Image: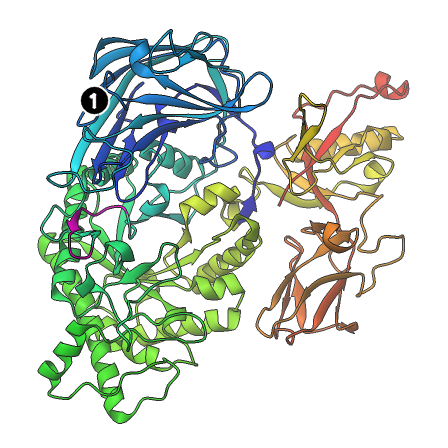
Amino acid sequence: MLWLSQKADRFEEQSITRFDPRFWTVNFPRPMMAAVTNPGGEALDVSLVFYQRNDLAGLIWESEDLFDHPLLSYETRRDYRHVILTFRWQSVGIKTLADGFGPTLTIEGRDATGTPRTWFVRLWNYASGTASNAVITLDFNNLDGGFFLPAEADPVYAGDIDRMFISMVPDDYDPEDDSPLTGGAVEGRVSMSDIRVTGGNADLAIGDDYVKPHTIRMANGYDDSFNITPARLMRNVLQLGYRAWFTHYVGMSHYYTMAWDAQALRWVVDPAAPALNAATLAWHTDLFSRLARFRMTLVLSLSFEILDQNAPDAWAQRAHDGSRALTGWEPPSTLIAPTNGEALGWLERVFSAFGDLMDAAGLPLVFQIGEPWWWVSLGEGRIPHFYDPQTLAAYPLETGHPVPEKHQSATEIPSAEQQLFLDWLGEKLGAATHRLRDHVKGRYPGAHVALLFFTPQVLDDSAPMLRSVNFPVSHWASPAYDLMQIEDYDHVIDGNWADHARGVDSVVSELGYPLEKTQFFSGFVLLEEDRHIWRNIEFALEDAERRGFSERVIWAYTQVVRDGVVMFDLDQKEQDLAGFHDVRLPDTVSFGSTGGPRFSTRVVATASGHERRNRDWDQARADYDISSGLRSVDDLAQLMAFFRARAGRAYGFRFRDWADHRSSLDRSPPAPTDQEIGVGDGSNQEFQLIKRYGDGDMAHIRRITRPVDGSVRIALDGVERTTGWSVDPHSGLVRFDVAPLDGAVVSAGFLFDVPVRFADDALSLSLEAFDTGAAPAIRLLEIKE
């Protein structure tokens, strides 16, 4: 149900015009905010919110597509020679084209000798019209950097450009002054319309694959996608087969409006200002209209989390020593105290602001209260953050009891007085989520409210007080919320399936929501080098399906696109883009074939004669020619039948590479100690079959995804184990019934096939050609799984 694809795997391409408005991005430093949208046609809009005199936003075009799925990305082409870009520029609230520090096109690349260069092209030098409403024409064959032309002309070499961006700054811009703008935040707006591109390099190829719609749902975070257009986001979502439900977490750092705190000397959330800043409003208005157009159900997610540097002092949860709750993100976020009435009132206003946008777009009104909890720090200290001033003042007033001795670690055993306090904290958490629920339902009759429950932060045997403060069963039990959503990515990432099962079972049994009102969130893979974790996510999604949960959600969009994740339902596996028939090409045809591994390396010779080598692929992709294995008319008939059954390139299949199909490096039969596939840690139950080529740090590790059924042998510390484990023949994943002990060396021996597909949809053979030994090449390409 999950495939990690690469650009080389795509089937379909089309062309787009360079500078397509859907594919521009924005970037900027904190605290300012910006968003880019595509209102339709050949146009884009940029909404800006400036807070400081040195705020600067960039509207960016990348020569390399950094933000689309490999099956859907545009080609990398750094040569802009012969390209002519024309557009109308209109602006308000920023420095004009004619001003110093006015909109400037910064071009980053290399000159004709390969030397890195940056050019600064003043747009006013190429404008026709007024300083805030002009048609700009950029002929990349005749483009000069420099403020005054021709006196300061710096000719641009357009043959090797990495990226370019247009700067946008406030009227009071001063690059050396980070003081607040007079009068507070300033809003700006830019429109680029009538975008036209002509010339020999005007077009780019772009992936255009479509995945069959499936039953996995998408979750997205605004903090991860604020810089791209909603049009770009939705193109990826829809063409990757995601439908029906779309969960959107509004994040913790970009959506709100801020004011300058002169005492603290920092920007903080302004409860008196509109809840959403102008850029957030523009971006979400666009996104919500697109979701409504495709009749998707949006789940609008808001949590108690907020970027620490912008959180008012009184709102943050605090430890026994007064220190603020800080998560592990960089920069860190903090958590709003559930007892803080002002903070909860602000969250209500945020829900209302987004809800009004949803209602205006015609979307169903579904809201999620995301991961509500009292924070306990991660790591050895496990420091509870239960002691902010608001909470400490409220406890004796409401209960008549004094605040007991403060806990310094969540692993401590509470006294009777401390347990009363912990139980009260749980009650306050439940009351806080009920307050948000009741606000939403009161404002939007018929709205649905979901609660997202994160099991690892609550169900921890080493810190039992977490259950008291973060699992208020009496408040959260069915039917308190319309949907119960379960998330446990810590357990999934670690492959800790025992705790995964225990946590999910506990939520299901204790809260009592029916399966049709229970949803599961699986994810996520934070770092690109940890792509192996996707197999754990796949297993968790399969487990959620077995349990009968109504919806399964993959978290999150950005990682799915980055790693080339393609989802499909198990019952459509032989019908979609990643279709695979679990059959092997007959040995009589494959024996005698030629071919083997192929890498992709770009080699660039510098002016000095040295080389720069860039390795595009982490894993080799095998390429075979099976025409040399055809020795009889019967072989030819077998191949023709096999080719038709696979529908040409449509379906993959198993292929035996006679030169490399054993775990051993020689021709000996598989032994259980051939390949070390991992070391036990006492909790991990899953290990991927691999084959190692070479030794030490320079060894090449090959994932084995198609072991031959019945050939796998397993050993622990060199002793073969014939029971207590199983292997998935479709992924090469070995699962132990009981996790190997810490330090136990896990090894394996096996036979394996290579997953391949035909390289072409046509098989051009004739008996005459075959009889004369002139059969054309019949290529197979390895499928990356």
Image side of residue 161 versus residue 655, left or right: left
- For the record, the magenta segment spans 254-264
Residue drawn at (37%, 17%) of the image:
121
> Looking at the picture, which amino acid does disc 1 mark?
Ser
For the residue pair 299 and 87, the one nearer the viewer reads as: 87
For the residue pair 658 and 557, the one nearer the viewer reads as: 557
The x and y percentages for residue 311 are 22, 57
The residue beneath circle 1 is 91
Q: Is residue 241 above or below residue 366?
A: above
Q: Is residue 214 above or below residue 167?
A: below
The x and y percentages for residue 255 are 24, 46
The x and y percentages for residue 159 are 53, 16
For the residue pair 36 and 590, the one nearer the viewer reads as: 36
Which secondary structure dominates the residues rendered in magenta? loop
Can residue 507 be seen by looking at this rendering?
Answer: yes
| Res. 340 image quadrant | bottom left
Image side of residue 775 versus residue 383, left or right: right
The x and y percentages for residue 50 are 21, 37
Image side of residue 679 versus residue 505, left or right: right
Pointer 1: residues within 10 angstroms few (<14), some, or many (20+)? many
Quick one: SS at disc 1?
strand
Please state the total of marks drawn on the protein image.
1
Please say whether residue 146 is one of the residues in the magenta stretch. no
Quick one: quadrant of the C terminus? top right
Q: How is the image coloured?
A: rainbow
